């Protein structure tokens, strides 16, 4: 099954700046692991990395935060995981990064 990663919001990004939602970065409800994985997800989406989960498992800076951080982000709705049929009626797994918590 093909996996796709994207955001459902617009943000500014260049070599020096990534305009992440401040409400997420400043949230006291989120653990440092969740914030770290959120930042990596958005960054890797901007870099058009196709296998974000595989990449995060191999990044020293992220691999220890991946499991607990991703679980927390999925639970609070900052990342949504959905199976969606494409135009060819094939199922795809979508990870959608949002900027609003449930």
Image (cartoon, helix red, strand yellow):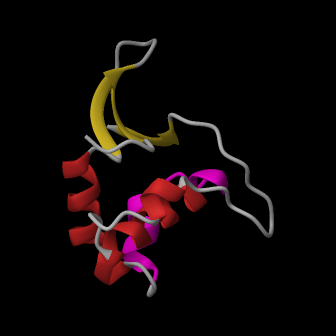
For the C terminus, give its image quadrant.
top left
For the N terminus, give its image quadrant.
top left
Asked if residue 30 is positioned above or below residue 51 in the image, the reply reads below
Determine whether, in the image, residue 44 is placed left or right of residue 13: left
Number of numbered labels in the structure image = 0
Q: Residue at x 43, y 13 (%)?
A: 88
Residue 18 location (% of width, % of height) = 68, 61
The residue most toward the bottom is 60
Which quadrant holds residue 19?
bottom right
Q: Does any portion of residue 10 appear in the rendered image? A: yes
Residue 26 location (% of width, % of height) = 44, 66
Q: Which of these two is toward me, 71 or 2?
A: 71
Determine whether, in the image, residue 39 is placed left or right of residue 82: right
Q: Residue at x 45, y 85 (%)?
A: 61
Residue 95 location (% of width, % of height) = 38, 42
Asked if residue 96 is positioned above or below residue 74 in the image, the reply reads above
Residue 22 location (% of width, % of height) = 53, 58
Determine whether, in the image, residue 46 is placed left or right of residue 75: right
Main secondary structure type of the part rendered in magenta: helix
Q: Residue at x 38, y 61 (%)?
A: 53
Magenta span has 51? yes
Asked if residue 39 is positioned above or below residue 20 in the image, the reply reads below
Q: Does any portion of residue 51 appear in the rendered image? A: no
Magenta span has 65? no
Q: Which of these two is toward me, 64 or 10?
A: 10
Which quadrant holds residue 36?
bottom left
Q: Write the start and end of the magenta stretch as one range.
A: 45-59
Q: Residue at x 34, y 47 (%)?
A: 79
């Amino acid at each position: 099954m093909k996996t796709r990663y994207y955001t459902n919001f617009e943000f500014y990004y260049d070599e020096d700046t990534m305009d992440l939602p401040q409400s997420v970065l400043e949230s006291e409800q989120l653990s440092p692991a969740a914030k770290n994985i959120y930042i990596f997800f958005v960054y890797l989406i901007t870099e058009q990395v196709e296998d974000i989960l595989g990449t995060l498992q191999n990044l020293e800076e992220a691999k220890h935060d991946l499991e607990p951080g991703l679980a927390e982000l999925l639970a609070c709705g900052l990342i949504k995981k959905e199976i969606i049929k494409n135009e060819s009626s094939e199922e795809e797994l979508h990870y959608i990064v949002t900027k609003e918590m449930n």
